[in-house]
Amino acid sequence: MKKIKYLEAEGNTVEEAVEKALFELKLSRKSVKIQVLSEEKKGLFGMPGAKPAKVRVSVILNKENT
C-alpha cells in the first residue's frame, strides 16, 4: 500500500515556493516530485497585478516508511 503526501506552496518565484514546501515537509529535493502549478507574474513597473508562483511538492511513501 502506498500513501501520497503533498504540499502546495506559493512564493515570489518558483524556487522560493519549492524551498518553502521542502522546509515544511522537512525533505530534500531528491526525495520529492515537484510540479509547477503556476509561474509568477510580475506587475507592470511594480504595479498591482503580480501573482505568486505556486507549486505542488509530492513524496510517495511506501508502507514500510510510514
Image: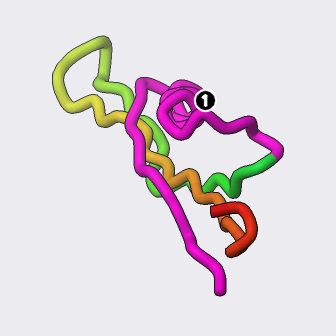
Give the residue at x 48% y 44%. Answer: 39
Give the residue at x 20% y 17%. Answer: 47
Q: Position of residue 27 (x, y in %)?
A: 67, 38
Furthest toward the right, the residue is: 30
Furthest toward the bottom, the residue is: 1
Question: 30 or 52, which lies in front?
Answer: 30
Give the residue at x 50% y 58%. Answer: 6
Q: Which residue is mark 1?
A: 15
Q: Position of residue 41 (x, y in %)?
A: 39, 35
Q: Is residue 5 magenta?
A: yes
Instruction: State the extent of the magenta-drawn residues as a range.
Output: 1-30
5 over 48 or under it: above or below: below
Horizontal side of 54 relative to 46 (left or right) equals right
**Other-residue count near label 1 (Cα within 10 Å), few / some / many at <14 / 14–19 / ≥20:** few
Q: How many marks?
A: 1
Q: Is residue 6 magenta?
A: yes
47 over 10 or under it: above or below: above
Horizontal side of 8 relative to 3 (left or right) equals left
The N terminus sits in image quarter:
bottom right
3 over 48 or under it: above or below: below
- Check disc 1 and give the amino acid type: Glu
Q: Position of residue 4 (x, y in %)?
A: 56, 70
Furthest toward the top, the residue is: 46
Q: Position of residue 59 (x, y in %)?
A: 64, 59
Horizontal side of 57 relative to 63 (left or right) equals left
Instruction: Write down the quadrant of residue 66 in the picture.
Output: bottom right
Horizontal side of 46 relative to 14 (left or right) equals left
Residue at disc 1, secondary structure:
helix
Question: 49 or 36, which lies in front?
Answer: 36
Furthest toward the left, the residue is: 48
Give the residue at x 43% y 36%. Answer: 40
